[in-house]
Image: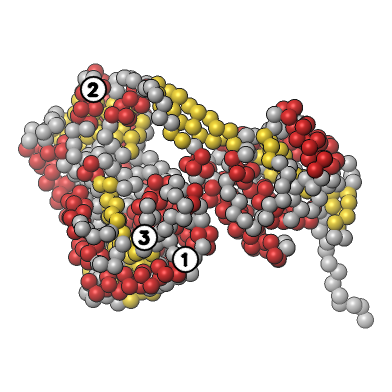
Amino acid sequence: MPSKARVAVRKTYKLFIGGAFPRSESGRTFEVDGNNVALASRKDARDAVLAARAAFGKWAGATAYNRGQILYRAAEMLESRRGEFPAEEVDDAVDRLVWYAGWSDKIAQVYGSANPVAGPYFNISSPEPTGVVAIIAPSSFLGFVSVLAPAIVTGNTCVVVTPAAVDAITFAEVLATSDLPGGVVNILTGSVAEVAPWLASHDDVNGLDLTGVDNAELALTLEQSAAGTLKRIIRRSSPKWTDDPGIGRMTAFLETKTVWHPKGV
Amino acid sequence: MFTYAPAPESRSIVNIKPSYGLFINGSFVDGGSAFKTINPANEEVLAEVAEATKEDVDRAVKAARAAFKTWSKLPGKERAKYLFRIARIIQERSRELAVLESLDNGKPIKESRDVDVPLVAAHFFYYAGWADKLNHAGFGANPRPLGVAGQIIPWNFPLLMLAWKIAPALACGNTVVLKPAETTPLSALLFAEICQQADLPPGVVNIVTGAGATGAALVDHPDVDKVAFTGSTDVGRHIAKAVAGTKKKVTLELGGKAANIIFEDAPIDQAVEGIVNGIFFNQGHVCCAGSRLLVQESIYDTLLESLKRRMGTLRVGDPLDKNTDIGAINSQDQLKRIKALAKIGSEEGAEAWSPPCELPRNGFWFRPTIFTGVSQAHRIAREEIFGPVLSVLTFRTPAEAIEKANNTPYGLSAGIWTEKGSRILDMADKLRAGVVWANTFNKFDPASPFGGYKESGYGREGGRHGLEAYLAV
């Protein structure tokens, strides 16, 4: 008698670039929890930066309300797929997305200002996104979400590098079903030591978050390399991810623009 | 002019019950007597609604007080989730809410559908996000809620005014007892069902329907910590007097007589759109309506000609018709007030003009009307008409425009139309009004504070500033 045991269909874990899930152009994989996942290359990194740059104008130009809605939608999608993520981290990760969703239309109200200059001038300072941010994500899932959300909620687009491929790519599936425009978040799974230097020195990357770099020497090299185009930096650290995140991860990748205009009849 | 075939929105999406009780402690309960709410477009009775007595109000305040203990201690991020849920349900049930609002209020469906309801959802979404960020709002560390808020809202934007009241109150950790206007209670009662659907803890939101006596009972209740009122300046004065000597915190959003100032360099077509939107939006039942048009003399003839031509294309009629620009006047009483002031306008020597348009036989209607030859002394230039009636005045210099614009006890809003940026900013500095629109009018956003100077009230709703009304700061 034939067996009735059903053979499971396995998932292929690929990269997340420009809203699509391509394999690494290098054709390489590495193994995470028994899955063969894509091992990103230098060229994948460059493709990801291109995708992030292409998505920047529209995302930065979207209304804050719209960006907030999309991040909240991502929280809804994550909640509905919570079984696929680390049980001890997923609740906080959902709440973290909701927290940042709410910041979209408030950060300018907290971080901007009307400036009483000594003269007949209207003068107002408002935050604007820096541009394309490369993020070396920490290995924990909550850490991953906690570095990604603050970078994009203000209108930046990003390229995230992580070896924790299974959670990261499953999270990409959450983002892909949240009306997030393709290219706003690009995820490269693979070796930080191999990929990060190309991002740190890339001329079209404006910010670099080194939070998840576990090797101090590598972090130093990356920061020095990033100095070439004066990238905005978040240095490596291992915060307790369940703590109140504050607004520092958003403001690190914001520019302040001040507009003057004369007043008179 | 070409004609339009009827394009009515279906009312079958909304299920109005024959009668509604009061929403107290999470469920609908019977009140004493009942009153009828009607569709002002055809005078059809829509439902019977309970009239809350002093005892009913007391029950509601007690429920809110009991709920405050746990609601105020709930972490902000958890309170936020309830508000996000409410925002989402409003988005999901938006068409139903829009149709109901147009039925009970008389406003055109294109406004309830495209303005009121989307702003309601956005308002809840915006303040949901503040619930766990109050430490960042600029009111010091750990700002505390006030307690029980008694809230009274008008009939012109029933659901939107509910959102402006309830969303910030709940985000800050207060509980509320809200009284909708007696002519437009239905969307608030549907909102009560939405609170149930969101599993909002009982007592956090209580809705008591009724008229002035119900409102007075709420304002006077000794266990209410905060009174928020939107409505007429007369009632606002009465409330300010009633709470004198108590510890109740008060915010008042009252009447207006906004100047909409058109300079000779303004783009005429856009200005005309802004004038029409400023005074005829929502039948002119708008506290910030641009009801005094100040036109620079040099363009008076050109502007008036364009304005009259544009007014000739306004479609007045069935609020549920998707083509309708101007719906029904909300009530018989309001129609009488508008007619009385319009009559006084003519008697005092101003000249009325309306485009020819047919009005439906039943219901309450008033043609869009402009008065020319209006002086500052005329009552139609001084008193809030709260209807589709525009008073036209002229000026020669910016200084004269400021003088005339500020010559009113009100100070809610103002409009400026000119291509010159520096003039906009200079005028904005000098106008004594809480909201100044430049080259636009009647724009609203949850992130933007709204409220008046002088006798238009005090306190702001919306934006970061809107939190202050509901925090012990």
Q: Looking at the image, can residue B407 be seen?
A: yes
Please tell me whether mark 3 sits on a helix, a strand or a loop: loop
Percent across and percent down for residue A3 are 90, 77
* Label pair 2/1, CB-CB below 8 angstroms: no
Residue drawn at x 72%, y 62% as measured from the top left: A85
Up/down of A135 relative to B275, above or below? below
Q: Are marks 2 and 3 on the same chain?
A: yes
Q: Which subunit holds the residue at mark 1? A: B
The amino acid type found where label 3 is placed reads Leu
Q: Label 2, secondary structure: give it.
A: helix
Left or right: A11, with A111 as reference point: right
Is residue A160 rendered to the left or right of residue B51?
A: right
| Residue B367: image location, x then y, percent | 22, 43
User: Are discs 2 and 1 both within one chain?
Assistant: yes
Residue B99 appears in the rendering: no
Type of amino acid at the residue the image marks with label 2? Ala
Q: Quadrant of residue A135?
A: top right
Which disc, if any, is residue B73? 1
Residue B465, above or below B427? below
Whether pointer 3 and pointer 1 mark residues with C-beta atoms closer than 8 Å, the reply is no
In the rendering, which numbered label is found on residue B399? 2
Q: Amino acid at mark 1?
A: Lys
First reached walking from the N terminus: tag 3 or tag 1: 1
